[in-house]
């Protein structure tokens, strides 16, 4: 019997990216089902009743959702971070989980510079701002997005330092980036720190006063990673203690914290209206098509290269 592949995107891909994903699924002889801009779990649970595989973005696949998918064999997160998926439950149910690493990295990296320049130029208010050339950018984690940020930073003549204990020294050397030996040193030396850590049990709440207080005068934190890695109470303390601190993010803190920050420190922060690091046509196409091809490879050829819950 033909396989059913669900494309479930609460935050949809562009229409052309979606159509290309659907075309790959159809060419493989599978049945595509598209569920876009849905609200709440009910439509997702209903659609999963007949799905053999699913392509998702930040859509929540918790135990309840996975439990409603009797035929599901594979979930592909069209993107990098898969903290939205209960991978342990998936494994227990023999459901493979994959991501598409690197496919949307450039889009996220470009947004980092967009936000940085927007803030440095006084949110385009016409008054005298500052340049980013010559300012040190510190990359907190050096995966695909960190590397893309490093490559762009060179064009801006920004010295780049990075901290990532999971990356071999050669990788920093090849990218022409100085690896620092401690996370404290990274924050101490960076005018801008760009966060690229995944949200894990270890990283959640890990960015707080201890690190932020080390930033030099005018230090700016840029978060295009996950809001969960920030200790929000300590973020507020940092704003209170350091009038020169700046925070830019496409994933605003929880509502109460965001409201306080915007009310008290409006000129020192910028939050995009929605999470939008990966919201480019190119990233939608890259991640969406990679996900569709990985599904075909998995079912037709047993390919498991990007499985994250082996
Ligand atoms: C990712 O982990 O790939 C990015 O955070 C993008 O997430 P999104 O697909 O939900 O925009």
Image (cartoon, rainbow, N blue to C red):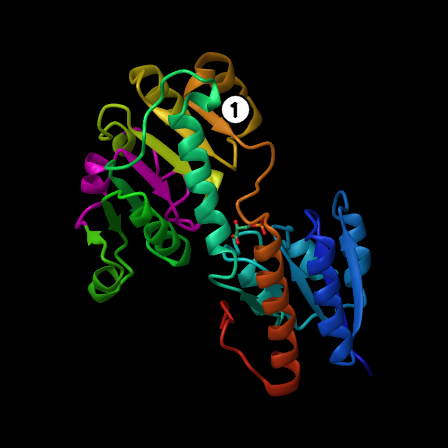
Judging depth in this view, the residue of 104 and 73 nearest the camera is 104
Judging depth in this view, the residue of 24 and 47 nearest the camera is 24
Percent position of residue 269, x then y: 44, 24
- The residue under the point 69% across, 52% down is 14
Query: SS of the residue at dot 1?
Result: helix
Location of residue 167 with respect to 31 vertically, above or below: above
Residue 223 is a magenta residue = no
Location of residue 170 with respect to 185 vertically, above or below: below
- The residue under the point 29% across, 49% down is 154
Would you identify the image quadrant in which residue 69 lies? bottom right
Location of residue 300 with respect to 305 vertically, above or below: below
Location of residue 220 with respect to 172 vertically, above or below: above
Q: Quadrant of the N terminus?
A: bottom right
Q: Is residue 77 at all visible to an observer of this figure?
A: no
Q: Which residue is mark 1?
A: 258
Mark 1 sits near ligand 1, with its Cβ under 8 Å away: no
Percent position of residue 274, x then y: 60, 36
Main secondary structure type of the part rendered in magenta? loop
- The residue under the point 26% across, 44% down is 157
Estimate how packed mark 1 is, as few (under 14), some (14 to 19) or many (20 or more) residues with alpha carbons within 10 Å: some
- The residue under the point 75% across, 79% down is 27
Q: Is residue 21 at all visible to an observer of this figure?
A: yes
Percent position of residue 152, x then y: 36, 50
Residue stretch in magenta: 180-209
Residue 187 is a magenta residue = yes
Q: Give left or right: position of 86 versus 185.
A: right
């Amino acid at each position: 019997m033909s396989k059913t592949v669900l494309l479930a995107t609460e935050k949809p891909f562009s229409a052309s990216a979606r159509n290309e994903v659907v075309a790959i699924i159809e060419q493989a002889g599978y049945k595509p089902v598209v569920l876009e801009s849905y609200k709440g779990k009910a439509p997702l649970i209903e659609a999963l009743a007949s799905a053999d595989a699913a392509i998702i973005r930040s859509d929540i696949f918790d135990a309840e959702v996975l439990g409603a998918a009797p035929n599901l064999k594979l979930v592909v997160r069209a993107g990098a971070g898969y903290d939205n998926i209960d991978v342990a439950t998936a494994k227990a149910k023999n459901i493979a989980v994959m991501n598409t690493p690197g496919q949307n990295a450039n889009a996220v990296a470009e947004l980092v510079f967009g936000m940085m320049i927007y803030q440095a130029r006084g949110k385009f208010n016409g008054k005298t701002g500052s340049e980013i050339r010559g300012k040190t950018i510190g990359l907190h984690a050096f995966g695909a997005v960190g590397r893309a940020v490093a490559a762009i930073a060179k064009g801006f003549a920004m010295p780049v330092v990075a901290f990532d204990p999971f990356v071999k020294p050669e990788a920093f050397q090849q990218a022409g980036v100085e690896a620092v030996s401690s996370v404290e040193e990274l924050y101490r030396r960076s005018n801008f720190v760009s966060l690229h850590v995944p949200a894990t049990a270890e990283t959640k709440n890990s960015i707080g006063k201890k690190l932020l207080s080390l930033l030099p005068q005018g230090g700016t934190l840029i978060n295009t990673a996950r809001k969960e890695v920030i200790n929000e109470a300590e973020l507020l303390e940092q704003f209170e203690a350091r009038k020169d601190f700046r925070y830019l993010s496409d994933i605003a803190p929880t509502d109460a914290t965001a409201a306080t920050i915007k009310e008290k420190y409006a000129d020192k922060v910028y939050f995009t209206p929605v999470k939008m690091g990966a919201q480019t046509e190119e990233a939608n196409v890259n991640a969406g098509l990679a996900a569709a091809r990985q599904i075909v490879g998995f079912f037709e050829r047993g390919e498991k290269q990007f499985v994250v819950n082996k």
